[in-house]
Amino acid sequence: MKEMSSMMEIVDFLMHGTRTGKLSTVREDGRPHVAPIWFVWNEGKIIFCTMDSSIKAKNVKHNPKVSICVDDESPPYAFVIVEGIAKFSDNQNDLLKWNTIIARRYMGEKLADAYGKRNTVKGSLLVEVTPTKMISEKDVAGW
């Protein structure tokens, strides 16, 4: 295994294709919870959207410390783990902007606007994760 050599390499990995993130949070009773997320990297933060009623939102309200794993499931395998602090915004203009940007990444240009509008509803939240630690490995199966 080799550590990724630069922040640019880490960001390129995070933003490659349509890799999903696996968001890890902690429930109030201490049990872990992992959920897949669509996300983008912007100005040093991971950005995703969720509903106020979701388990992940409830967990982050209780404890804003999160971990996100993004991995390449093809040999020779690689991953980035981002540990950080999450904060919420319910600003509808920001939600529409980021829901559309995220949809463009995962659904393509043709469907981005429709998905952005569909996902910007009452009760939706914008989540920004500011990294406190990043761990990266590439060529995990390499010799």
Image (cartoon, rainbow, N blue to C red):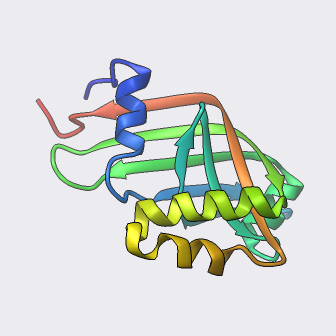
* Residue at (54% x, 72% y) in the render: 113
* Residue at (68% x, 43% y) in the render: 129
* Residue at (38% x, 57% y) in the render: 19
Q: Position of residue 78 (x, y in %)?
A: 29, 41
* Residue at (47% x, 30% y) in the render: 135
The image quadrant of residue 58 is bottom right
The reply to whether residue 73 is in sight is yes
**80 relative to 125 in the view: left or right:** left
**21 relative to 60 in the view: left or right:** left
Q: In the rendered image of this protein, does residue 55 appear above or below residue 7?
A: below
108 and 68: which is toward the camera? 108
15 and 64: which is toward the camera? 15
Q: Position of residue 143 (x, y in %)?
A: 11, 29
Q: Position of residue 68 (x, y in %)?
A: 56, 48
Query: Quarter holding the N terminus?
Result: top left
Q: Position of residue 88 (x, y in %)?
A: 82, 53
65 and 91: which is toward the camera? 91
